[in-house]
């Protein structure tokens, strides 16, 4: 069926009924009457194949039709092979995951996102550990915050049964990778901003956590745990 679809996309020889066509070849292109193009194709033992019907005049090639179809099928296959399959990788935490385990899983999640995969991270609450759901929420928000350079949040933490999920999608590579000059400029700008902050009067303290944490609707108790590192 797929082969028939490719075959039916193109008109060939007598199926081409316009007055004139543009013949393209390695040497360039030439506009000529369609009848003349057909005679030229017969003289070379090939076919007149219309490859761009919407052009004015339509664009054609002098080529063996079977060979042309083979080329189109091969290109379609190569294109399909190049299309990266986006997978959803899972990262599992406990409500009281230690720092070493957290950093280990953070590293893997970063690699997944850089490879173009999505990440579904969740905290599994076993038994009475469901009482620590706020602690699990803080953990997932910290996880998303630590990955903000390579991933964007598709779905904020939500509790589904005994699991609390957060979903992350990869950012475009162009927004992740920065040139050395860009990083140098950012460092200089940050240093200048720090110098201004020292000279300027103290301002009101920003929302706890910054970034995602500043906008997250979580309890004050959860924020205290995050700031205190408990």
Image (cartoon, rainbow, N blue to C red):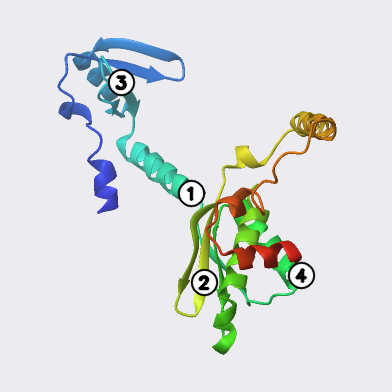
Residues at circles 3 and 2 in contact by the CB criterion of under 8 Å: no
Percent coordinates x, y for residue 90 in the rendering: 56, 68
**The N terminus sits in image quarter:** bottom left
> Of the residues under marks 3 and 2, which one precedes in the sequence?
3
Circle 4 Cα neighbour tier, 10 Å, few/some/many (<14 / 14–19 / ≥20): few
Circle 2 Cα neighbour tier, 10 Å, few/some/many (<14 / 14–19 / ≥20): many
Mark 2 and mark 4: span between their CA atoms?
A: 19 Å
Identify residue for label 4.
99
Q: Secondary structure at mark 1?
A: loop
| Left or right of 104 in this view: 118 | left
Image quadrant assignment for residue 224: bottom right
| x 52%, y 63%: residue | 166
> Of the residues under marks 1 and 4, which one precedes in the sequence?
1
Mark 1 and mark 2: span between their CA atoms?
A: 32 Å
Circle 3 Cα neighbour tier, 10 Å, few/some/many (<14 / 14–19 / ≥20): many
The one of 14 and 127 positioned closer to us in this rendering: 127
Residues at circles 3 and 1 in contact by the CB criterion of under 8 Å: no
Percent coordinates x, y for residue 99 in the rendering: 76, 70
Q: How many marks?
A: 4
Image quadrant assignment for residue 100: bottom right
Image quadrant assignment for residue 36: top left
| x 43%, y 14%: residue | 28
Identify residue for label 1.
83
| Left or right of 167 in this view: 62 | left
Mark 3 and mark 1: span between their CA atoms?
A: 28 Å
Circle nearer the viewer, 3 or 1: 1
Identify residue for label 2.
164
């Amino acid at each position: 069926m797929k082969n028939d679809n490719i075959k039916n996309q193109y008109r060939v020889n007598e199926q081409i009924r316009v007055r004139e066509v543009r013949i393209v070849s390695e040497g360039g292109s030439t506009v000529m009457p369609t009848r003349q193009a057909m005679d030229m194709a017969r003289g070379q033992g090939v076919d007149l194949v219309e490859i761009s019907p919407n052009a004015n005049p339509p664009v054609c090639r002098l080529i063996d039709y079977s060979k042309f179809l083979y080329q189109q099928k091969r290109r379609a296959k190569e294109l399909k092979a190049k299309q990266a399959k986006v997978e959803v990788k899972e990262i599992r935490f406990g409500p009281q995951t230690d720092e070493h385990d957290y950093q280990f899983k953070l590293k893997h999640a970063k690699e997944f996102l850089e490879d173009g995969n999505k990440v579904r991270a969740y905290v599994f609450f076993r038994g009475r550990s469901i009482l620590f759901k706020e602690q699990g929420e803080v953990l997932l928000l910290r996880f998303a915050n630590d990955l903000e350079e390579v991933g964007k949040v598709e779905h904020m933490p939500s509790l589904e049964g005994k699991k609390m999920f957060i979903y992350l999608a990869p950012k475009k590579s162009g927004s992740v990778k920065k040139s050395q000059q860009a990083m140098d400029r950012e460092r200089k700008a940050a240093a200048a901003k720090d110098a201004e902050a020292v000279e300027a009067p103290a301002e009101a303290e920003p929302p706890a956590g910054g970034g995602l944490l500043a906008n997250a609707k979580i309890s004050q108790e959860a924020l205290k745990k995050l700031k205190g590192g408990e």
